[in-house]
Amino acid sequence: MWNWEYAIMILPEILKALKITVSATFVAFVVALVVGLMLTLARRSNFKPLSLFAGGFVGFVRSTPLLVQLYFIFYVLPEYGLSLTPFVAGVIGLGLHYSTYLAEVYRGGIESIPPGQWEAAKALNFSTLNTWKKIILPQSIPPVIPVMGNYLITMFKETPILSAITLVEIMQTAKMLGSHSFRYLEAFTIVGVLFLVLSYSSSLMVRRLEVRLNLR
Amino acid sequence: MSVPLKLIYNEDPTKNTGSEARKNIVGPIVIYNNISKSYGDLQVLKNIDLEIAPGEKVALIGPSGSGKTTLARLLMTLEEPTSGTIEVEGEMLWHQRVNDKLIKANEKHLHQVRGNIGMVFQHFNLFPHMTILRNVMEAPRNVLGLSKEEAKERAVKMLAQVGLSSKIDAYPAQLSGGQKQRVAIARALVMRPKVMLFDEPTSALDPELVGEVLEVIKAIALEGEMAMLLITHEMDFAKDVADRILFFDQGRIIEQGPPKKIFNNPESERLQTFLSRFNRH
């Protein structure tokens, strides 16, 4: 049965692991944001090899399981001389995986820009770089921020998979606590509640952000 | 109505050398040479030959879908001609001459020649995420490479000339259609193009807002410096402003001449029919 004393005793250790989980989420999210944008731009490029590569990369990453990708990065790459810590391998794997989804989000935002904006930019003789920087991206990103926020939450809930490559995040910590004491109820319940509280409160924030952006 | 009639377009004294040099150029500033444009099977422009002199004001009239807008869009490099060449100030626009052979121009070449052209669109196409001031100063800053102060000074002056000094901190969504189009005109003018294209600048406006925009364009035309290509359905305006009227129908220039001749003695039957439709309104 539920033991409060035990639950309170293990709470600090779980919270410490939560820090790893949260920072892995954010670092992976930044990777996904940056790589996702690069993928979107590469796919729109007139330079065929680049757009084909980006399209192939997206197709490949999306059609293989995240777990396989993580194993590959963490266990196979060292055989070719590239050894990564569990944290680095984890954020790269998670980040690259979600970059393919964020690329779609960027694309949606970019395609919603009316052609007249591109034409005005050209008529004013803006360079390609400045057209993106000053005209297109500042208009296409704000409307998709809520969707990006939802991906952040999804990624957060996906982090327990990183325990598979030995990252001692919240789930791995709970498992270890359980195997020490043969008590699993408290540890896993705390983990579940923490995910619930953080995900749900974040989703409320995203919804509020959405309302605010719609008002603009 | 608070639009000043006198627009000081060329306030930069260093530009005088440029305009003097321009007088020495005998040739036209724009030449369309046997230009055709097709979309699939639909040919919207058929072997157009047209020359525009520096400072000349040319009005394009004709039924919708006659190819007027496409003619302007080819010059703004928004569309590529299917065949033929366009020259701006003696320089090929869509082509480059390499070893005596004409090849398709690269973006660098297009960028360089395009700088001579400015355009005002039917639907304004202002940048909604920028204030009015930034809409006007962003291109001088980023394209012409002016300092922030210079770009701002130029933009503020230009906005004053279209009568919108009080709106510089507003966003496009807060303006009326007529005000938006005046901002769009300022935004194009601030780049000091040698040729300005107006693509039905008042067609998207409520009738009561048409006047203020036409007045601004008229004032610019009186300055005389720039060549202008005006696509319009406002016949009185065309009569007032243009040196020459071109009547377009089905992708061809059917008739052209000074406004008096076009409106008082139209020769072709198609132009007569077209004008009679207008007079009935």
Image: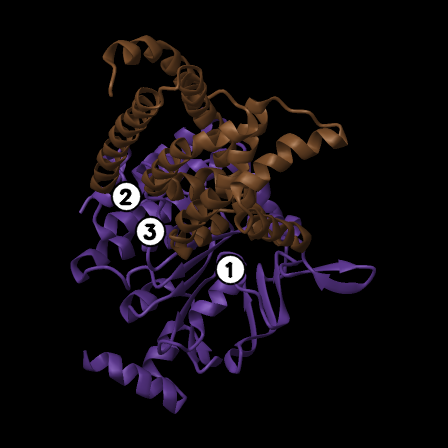
Chain colours: A brown, B purple
Q: Position of residue B194 (x, y in %)?
A: 51, 51
Query: Three-letter amino acid code at disc 2?
Result: Pro
Badge 2: how crowded within 10 Å, few (<14), some, or many (20+)? many
Asked which secondary structure carries label 2, the reply is: helix
Looking at the rendered structure, whether the residues under marks 3 and 1 are on a common chain is answered as yes
Residue visible at 30% across and 48% down?
B182
Nearest the camera: A63 or B41? A63
Q: Chain of mark 1?
A: B
Relative placement, left or right, of A70 versus A160 is right
Q: Check the image and name the residue furthest to the right.
A: B99
Q: Say which chain tag 3 marks.
A: B
> Disc 2 versus disc 1: distance between alpha carbons?
23 Å
Mark 3: amino acid: Ala
B21 shown above or below A116: above
Q: Residue at x 47, y 24 (%)?
A: A24
Quarter of the image holding residue B240?
bottom left
Q: Which SS class for mark 1?
A: loop
